[in-house]
Amino acid sequence: MKEERPPLLTLANYQERARDSLAASVQAVAALLRDQPDQRDAIARSAGIMLLEAPTGSGKTLVLGRALEAVRGALPERCVWFWFAPYSGLVAQTREALSQQCPSLRLRNVQSDRGAKNVRDGDVFVQTWASVAANNKDSRKARRDAEDALSLDDMLAELRADGVHIGVVIDEAHVNFGASAKAAAEFYLATLRPDFTLLATATPNDEKLEEFEQRAGIVVESRITIERGEVVRAALNKHGLMLGVLRFSSDDQKLIDPEQATLTAAWLQHNAIKSRLVEKGRAVTPLMLVQVEDQARGGADPVRRVREKLREVGVPDSVIAVHTSGEPDPDFHTLAYDPGKEVLVFKVSVATGFDAPRAWTLVSVRPNRGKAFGMQIVGRIMRVHPDIRPLHGTDPLLDRGYVFLTDPELQAGLDAAAEELKAVRSSIDVIADELSVIEFSNFDSALLAERQKHLPHTPRVPQSDAERQQRLLGLIEGGFVADSVLGQNAAKQDQAIVTGEWRKALSATPLFGDLPETPAPSKQAIRREKRFPLRTDLGIPRALLKEVLPPPDQYHDLTVAGAAKALFRQAETPLDSLTRVRTHATLALRDIFLMQEEERKIAIRMSAARVAQAAQASFEFNDQIDTRALKQALIEEFARVCEEEGAEYTEKDLRRALDLFAMSHPTAIPTAVREAQASHVLVQNAEPLPDLFVSDEEAHRKTTRGAYAVYPPNMNKEELAFAELLDKDTSGRVKWWLRLQENASWAPALVLPTGHRFFPDFAVGVNGRASPDSIALVEIKDDGETGRLHSQRNRDKIRTQHREYKRVTWTYRRKDGRWVEAVYDSALEDIVPKTAFSVETLVHVT
C-alpha cells in the first residue's frame, strides 16, 4: 500500500514574504550573470549571497525549499542546488521535509548519484558540509572518482561548463562552519564556486558566520530578518519561556541532590502538561528533554547517572530514550513522534536543529551555558505542535516552554538569548532592485584585499633559495635551529625558519626585565643570650596537669560504646528522623519573554546517595575511632531504642535516619563522643616547667606577675594586651600568669572529641579559684568579626573542659577596647559574646 503524502502546508504571511524575497533576489542575480558573464565569480560572492535570519521553529527549511521551487523554471539556465545540514542526522530530517512539502524538487544523493548529463532544473543534493569539506580525506568519498560516477569536483566543473547554475543552501549556518571553517571556505571558493548562496540561521550576528564570510571573501548583501513575534502570532512558536530554579532552606540544601531535585521539578511540570493535554482532548504526549554534559575521559558516564536519577524520581525506564555519540539511537529523529517515549536524554550535538514539536520541558545539567546554548534551548522547546495550534493563546500552561537549570547562577545564557531575540525586528533588505546599477569589474580584488585584513597573520616564509639559506644559517649560528635542518627539503627548512625566528624573538625579552640586582643580606651579629628564671616565689607549681588518652585498645572500644548510649540521651536523637523522607523546596519560575514570575512549593525526595555521602564526614572527625565500628554501634543502639519505643524499622531506615540526623545535627555525634571519652580521659603531670626562659632579644619589658618576670616576645597584639591586663590587676586576684606554648611537653593539654589536643594560650594563678593550684586556663581570640573565631575547630575547643582545671575561659577585645567573655550557644551552634570580662570571671569554676 502506497504511503499517503501529508497535505502541503500553507505558508504564513511572513513565510510568503521571505520566500518571495529570496526568489526575487535569485532571479535578479541570474539576470545579472547572464548580462555580465565575465564577472561571474565577483557577482556570486557579493550579490549572490542571501541570508535568512529567523527563530528556530519558524519554518526556515520550508521557506528555503519553497523559494527553490519558486525559481525552478524561472531562471535563464538550469540550476542545481547543494543543501548543507550541520549534522548527518539532520540530513534525513531535511530530505523528508523537502520530499513532503516541496514535491517539485528532485532529491539526489551526492554519494551515489553524481551524473552531470541527466540533471534537471531544481535538483537538490542534501548532505553535511563535513562530508565534502572535511580535513580528513577518507571522509570525502564524494570528492573521488568511482568506476560508475564522476567525482564531485569533476561533476561541478562539467555542470559549470554546460552553463548550469550552481546554488548552495547552508542551513543552520551558525554551526555549519565551526571547526571546519577553513576547509569549508577552501572548498566553497575553489570547488563549489556557487552562483547563489542561501544562508539560514537562528542566531543573528554569530561569530562563526562572520569568520566564514571573512575566510571565503564574501559579503551578505541581501538579508531577510524575521522577528519572534511574527512566529508566535502564526502559532509556530510558544508565547513564553519559563525559567525554573529551585530554592532550598540552608538546612535542607545539604540533604538534596540539586540535579535530582531539578529533574523532579521538571517531571512534575511534564506531568502537569500531560494531564492538561488529556483534559483538552488532545492526543499528544509531551516530551521532556534532558541535556547532559560530555563524558570526561575515564570519568563516570553522565547518561547512566542521570538515567538512574530519573528512575529514583519515578520516571518509568520504558519511557526514557537516549541518544548520544556513544549510545546512538538509529531511530532518533522518529522519537519526536513516538508517544511511547516521554524523556529524551541527549548531549549538546543533538540540541541544534532537532525537530521536536511535542517538547515542552527541558532540563540542562551541562556546566557551560552561554548565549549559543540559550538560543538552541529556546529553539528546542518553543515549537508548537500542529495539533495544539487551535489552542494557541488560550492556555498559559500550554503556551509556554519550561527550562530547568541545576544551578541558578547559570541563567545568563538564556537571558542573553532572550534579549537578543526580543531586539530583533522583522526586515527585508535585499539587493534585487539594485543589481542593475552595480559595477562588478573591480569587486574581486578590492573585496579580497579588505578581507585579508581580518585573516590571522602567519610568519613570512623565504621568497628565494638565497634568502632561505641566509636566514637559516643565521638561526643555526644563534642556536635557534639545529644544523641537521640543512639536509632537509625546502618546506622543512621554511618551517624551521619560522619556528626559529619565533624562538629568537622570545629570547630577546628578558624573563625578569631590567630589575636591579640586590646584594645578599649580610649576616646579623650574634646576640648574647639572656636567661630569665622561673619565679617559684609567686606560687607557680613545678608542673601543670595535662589530659591524655588511655591506651588505644581501651580507648576505642570504651569510647564507641559510650558514644552510642550518649547520643540517645540527648534531647534530639536519630529517632526523630526515622520517618523523614522528603523536604520542601520553592520553585521560582520566571518568563524571560513575558516578564512574569510565579512561585510554588513542591516536595522533593531527599537523595539517599547524597545524604549518605555528605553524612560520611559527620562520622570522620576522629582519626583514632574506626568509622565503621562507630556507625555499627550507633545502629545497634538505634535498633534497641526502636524496640523499646515500639517503632517499626528496617536496617535501611535506620541508616538513612542516622545519616540525616548526623547531617542536620553536626555537633551531636562529636558531643556524644566527648561525653563518652570524658570519663576515660586520664590526667597526669606534664613535664616540669622550664627553669629558665632563654631569649636572644636585646630588650625585654619587665612584668610584675609574669612567670619569668618579662613579657615573652612570641605574643601577638591581643595576647600582649591580655597579659598587660593581668599584670596591672589591682583586685589582688591574679597571683601569676604564664604564656603557654603550643605542643610544648610542659603545657596543659585538653583532649578534643576529634582525638586532637587543645593548648590554651594562658595559665593564670587566681586567688579564690577552687581548682588545682588555683589555676584557670584562658584562650585569647581576635575581635570575633573576621571569622577565625567561628571555625568548627574553635567550636569543638570551646565546648571541651579540662578534667581538673574545668572550663577554659575564652575572651576577646571589641573594637572599643573592652574585653568580653565568649561562650558557646547550643541553640545557635556558634560562639557568641556573653558578658564583659574581668579578672573576677576567672574565680568561678564551671
Image (cartoon, rainbow, N blue to C red):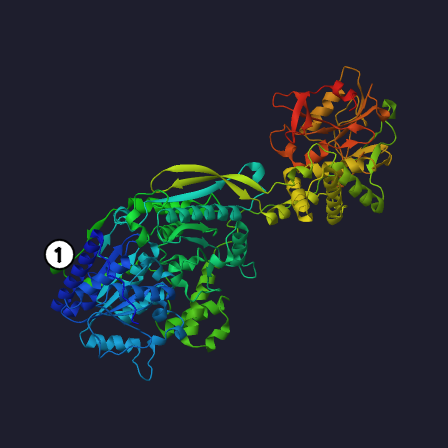
Q: Is residue 598 left or right of residue 235?
A: right
Q: Is residue 708 left or right of residue 302?
A: right
Q: Quadrant of residue 195?
A: bottom left
Lateral position of residue 90 relative to residue 760, left or right: left
Depth check: 426 or 587 in front? 587
Q: Quadrant of residue 121?
A: bottom left
Where residue 476 appears, x then y in whole percent?
48, 69
For the image shown, how many numbered marks are present on the structure?
1
In the rendered image of this protein, does residue 638 appear above or below residue 292?
A: above
Residue extending farthest top: 731
Q: Quadrant of residue 451?
A: bottom left
The residue identified by callout 1 is: 433
Q: Secondary structure at mark 1?
A: loop
Q: Residue at x 30, y 72 (%)?
A: 1
209 up-or-down from 700: above or below: below
- Residue 211, horizontal then vertical, whole percent: 33, 58
> Going 48% across and 64% down the picture, which residue do you hit?
327
Q: Position of residue 548 (x, y in %)?
A: 83, 39
Tell me the quarter of the image containing the C terminus. top right
Percent position (x, y) of residue 732? Answer: 80, 16
Residue in the foreground of this view, choosing between 120 and 846: 120
Q: Which residue type does callout 1 highlight?
A: Asp
Residue at (20, 77) in percent of width and height:
161
* Crowd around label 1: few <14 · some 14–19 · many ≥20 (10 Å): few
Q: Nearer the viewer, residue 828 or 571?
A: 571
Res. 527 visible in picture: no
